[in-house]
Amino acid sequence: MHDFMAILPLVATGAGAILVMLAAAFESFKKEGISILGIGLFAFAFFVQLTVESGAPITPYGSVFNGMLVTSTFTKGAGLIILACGFFSAIASQTYFTQNEGFVLEYYCMMLFAACGMLLMTMAAELITVFIALEIMSLAIYTLIASDRRSVLRSEAVLKYLMLGAFAGAFFVMGSVFIYAGAKSTKFADIGQVVAETGFLTNPALVGGSLLILVAFLFKAAAFPFHAWVVDVYDGAPVPVTGFMATAVKTAVFAVFANFLVINGQLQEGWVNYLFYISVLTMFVGNLIAIGQNSLKRMLAASGIVHTGYLIIALVAVNSEGFTGSTIIFYLAAYAASTLGIFAALSYLGGEGEKRNSFEDFNGLAKVRPYSAACIAIFLLSMAGIPPTAGFMGKFYIIAGAFQGGYISLGVLGIFSSILSMWYYLRLIIAMYFREPEEDFEVAEMTLAPLGTFVLALSVFAISFIPVVI
């Protein structure tokens, strides 16, 4: 029964996706019905994930799956974030498509398939399973981005993501081949054992294979120097899809990234110096890109690059012995709540055709819609790392972990990066509160996104009270 409950969230999202796909074939199902079904399935999967026992890692149905899956407290936390991201993105989608074109009945099916792939990534304990999960997630995301086939902007975004994603997938497969050549296995446990026995740097196949796999992970996480695609793709995707990509995809990628690095301490130590410089460059290049943006979606995409840099700091300072990943999960939860909240607000404030997308478009929002402006301000302050928000606590744990691990210069650079990011976060707050309104910000009635925005604003404060062991 424990094994069944461990994989039930994965089964629920996969079966739910198939159910939505079958329901979409019937003309009696309209957009509203499919939306409620998709939201309900994400809520069900989330509560199922809550029932999964925390504690020591277990291998569900080890003989059947041959040890391909492992669940733990870390995978449970990552799964909860992914399913929460899916739930709130589905709510934002229900509102977004009341004002915008491009909705297809299979939309929520693709969201559930993407979530299924992400959950499989977090549980994967060997490289072939990771690749299958990565492709399930990626193919669903490609479809979500290009759901409106009549939009040139959507087509351009998915073409860029598809081409670069194909290269990342190829790097991952080739890396897996090299690792199999060096370790005679694709299982994380077996690879770790080989590294412990023979060493890491003395095995060229393992070094080359892990390098290619790290490149694939860094691409999916939008880290320097593989960040160039993220701004255009996020800008071209529908607002709810952008929020889903920025949060759920990042959670899944960093979950499997961390699981791969902690296979063996020598593996993590072999790449820690390179990850050090990648994290610094990712933070500061992301800040420079974000400062120059006038579009909110492009600014948020660039800020996502910066947050990737903070998460890489956690990977640099991670302790492979007794790994819990609590700092990474906390930061991902804080980042997801703030980012999803902003995109949920944009889904109903953006208007028809996303006509409100620049900083100037939100001048005076606080005088017309004070509650929405207050929620957006909370999200921005959290992303900037201002207390008492979850974003502040997340950055505190990340930087404290860097100091504790002996990476004092990296922690100091992280603090400086956070100060630099206030420029573009406070810019929107100034526009909302210190400028005169130029319109009345009419939005569609009877939608769920405003409620989701309010719940996420409360979550930004609630998450900050969760205890974390650094």
Image (cartoon, rainbow, N blue to C red):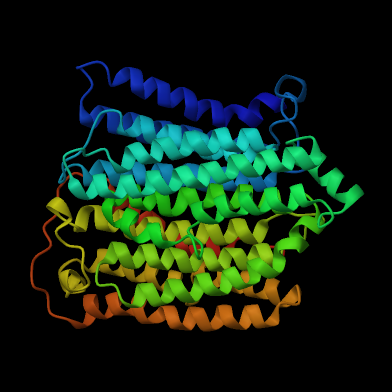
Task: Please identify the quarter of the rendering in which residue 4 is found.
Answer: top right
Residue situated in front as seen by the camera: 25 or 56: 25
Kindly identify the residue that appears in the image at 8 percent across and 73 percent down: 438
User: Can you see residue 338?
Assistant: yes
Kindly identify the residue that appears in the image at 16 percent across and 69 percent down: 361
Q: x, y percentage for residue 429?
A: 29, 76
Q: x, y percentage for residue 63?
A: 77, 21
Q: Is residue 132 above or below residue 320?
A: above
Q: Answer with left or right where residue 327 lies relative to residue 448.
A: right
Q: Is residue 30 above or below residue 272?
A: above
Q: Answer with left or right where residue 208 lies relative to residue 358.
A: right
Kindly identify the residue that appears in the image at 56 percent across and 32 percent down: 132
Q: Which residue lies furthest to the front in this view?
A: 204
Quadrant housing the N terminus: top right
Q: x, y percentage for residue 395?
A: 57, 71
Q: Answer with left or right where residue 341 lies relative to residue 207.
A: left
Q: Is residue 122 above or below residue 403?
A: above
User: Can you see residue 124?
Assistant: no
Residue situated in front as seen by the camera: 224 or 75: 224
Kindly identify the residue that appears in the image at 20 percent across and 17 percent down: 28
Q: Answer with left or right where residue 441 lies relative to residue 206.
A: left
Q: x, y percentage for residue 85?
A: 44, 47
Quadrant housing the C terminus: bottom right
Task: Please identify the quarter of the rendering in which residue 54 is found.
Answer: top right
